[in-house]
Amino acid sequence: MPRPPSPSIPEKEFVYGALKQSLRLDGRSMLEMRTPALSFGPELGWVECSLGKTRVLAQIDAKMVKPPPERPLEGIITIHSELSSMASNEYELGRPSDQEVTITRMLDKVLRRSDAVDKESLCVLAGQRVWHIRLTIHVLSDSGNMLDCACLAGIVALKHFRRPEVEVVGDEITIHHPSERAPMPLSMHHTPYCFTFAFFPDPATPPLLDPSHLEETLSAGLLSVALNAQRELCVVQKAGGVPLSPEDVLRIIDVAVQKAKELDKIVEHALQEDWAGRNVEVR
């Protein structure tokens, strides 16, 4: 499939000139995010997240497995992301692109390694049976800033999901059907969100939040910050060559903290609304 042409010189000059004056093509201010839209599927743990025209679907399934001998008291969480040519004709099926590898690694750091989910709570019978939670991220459409959209879809799916209630008597394990006993939410330590800022070759151009596809293509570097609304920093990842002073990074983290608080309210409201519609018990 032919790759889309790179931006023309007049297009580049126009965008760079506009950004220098803090003007963006879609009318947003430099530090304004596209408003996230969350929709929930028929099953718990099925979430579609949109940032403008960037759309990501997150799905969770759980099964019981034997834990690895080196971690007998912890459940397992795996994250798998799929970036196919459906998202954009830049991506080829069957061959993971650099962007797909970057997104999967970052999702692993933000959602698994930051201990967002309490792994010990997934243990059913020490050394014998634990829950294996698998999060699958499908990118449906790439219109810029897939990483933030994928992180948001992933964390909301984890919060939305419910696993079956389990009863242990001696060495016997009974998994109760949701119709018999209400399923259990995952035990979460915190709710990290990811925010990506784009930097441009001209130092006179201020950084911008939530870059569109064109802004991402023309940027000289990206800085992704993952943190929660309680100001706890999880990951800082910088891609690209623009040098940044510590003051620049701290300013960006301050902006990200404010955005995390706003995003937290949006997520909680969407979850409460969906659970009320399903008559799910909120614990």
Image (cartoon, rainbow, N blue to C red):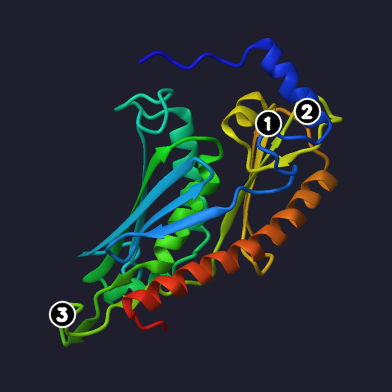
Label 2 belongs to which residue? 18
* Crowd class of label 2 (few under 14; some 14 to 19; many from 20; radius 10 Å): some
Residue furthest toward the front? Answer: 27
Gap in Å between the C-alphas at discs 3 and 1?
51 Å
Relative horizontal placement of residue 154, taking residue 42 as reference (left or right): right
Judge depth for marks 3 and 2 and give the one in front. Answer: 2
Gap in Å between the C-alphas at discs 3 and 2?
63 Å
* Crowd class of label 3 (few under 14; some 14 to 19; many from 20; radius 10 Å): few
Label 1 belongs to which residue? 221
* Crowd class of label 1 (few under 14; some 14 to 19; many from 20; radius 10 Å): some
Residue 112 showing in the rendered view: no
Q: Tell me which amino acid carries mark 2.
A: Ala
From the viewer's perspective, is residue 243 above or below residue 133?
Answer: above
Label 3 belongs to which residue? 173
* Nearer-N-terminus badge (3/1): 3
170, 189: nearer the viewer = 189
Label 3, secondary structure: give it.
strand
Residue furthest toward the bottom? Answer: 169
Relative horizontal placement of residue 153, taking residue 129 as reference (left or right): right
Label 2, secondary structure: give it.
helix
Q: Tell me which amino acid carries mark 1.
A: Gly
Residue 124 on image: x %, y %? 26, 76
* Nearer-N-terminus badge (2/1): 2
Gap in Å between the C-alphas at discs 2 and 1?
18 Å
Residue 145 on image: x %, y %? 56, 40
